[in-house]
Amino acid sequence: MVQAYILIQTEVGKASTVAETIAKMPGVVQAEDVTGPYDVIVRAQADTVDDLGRMVVAKVQQVDGITRTLTCPVVHL
């Protein structure tokens, strides 16, 4: 199982709608509005890195109101 944080920037006023939409997606553990340089932070999981990448590109980035994403895989050192 691969986990990652997806940091999302949105259009002004779209953060809560984006977080609500993403929270319903399979593989999303948590999606919350935040303040700072990013508007929404998502914790997601998938079976493989490739599956995670497909989820981000095919599903998350297609949500209306998103302007940029940054995916940060979780590592266990």
Image (tube, rainbow, N blue to C red):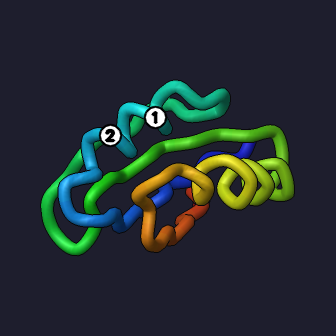
For label 1, the crowd category at 10 Å Cα-Cα, with few meaning under 14, some 14 to 19 and many 20 or more, is few
Quadrant showing the N terminus: top right
**Camera-side residue of 60 and 65:** 65
* Picture residue at 65% right of the left edge, 32% below the top: 27
**Camera-side residue of 59 and 46:** 59
Relative side of 68 to 12, left or right: right
Q: Is residue 1 above or below residue 13?
A: above
Q: Disc 2 on helix, strand or loop?
A: helix
Percent x, y of residue 8: 40, 62
Percent x, y of residue 33: 24, 46
Q: Which residue is mark 2?
A: 17
Amino acid beneath label 2: Thr
Q: Which residue is mark 1?
A: 21
Mark 1 and mark 2 in contact (Cβ < 8 Å)?
A: yes
Q: Is residue 31 above or below residue 53?
A: above
**Camera-side residue of 74 and 10:** 10
Residue 76 in view: no
Q: Quadrant of residue 31?
A: top left
* Picture residue at 27% right of the left edge, 50% below the top: 15
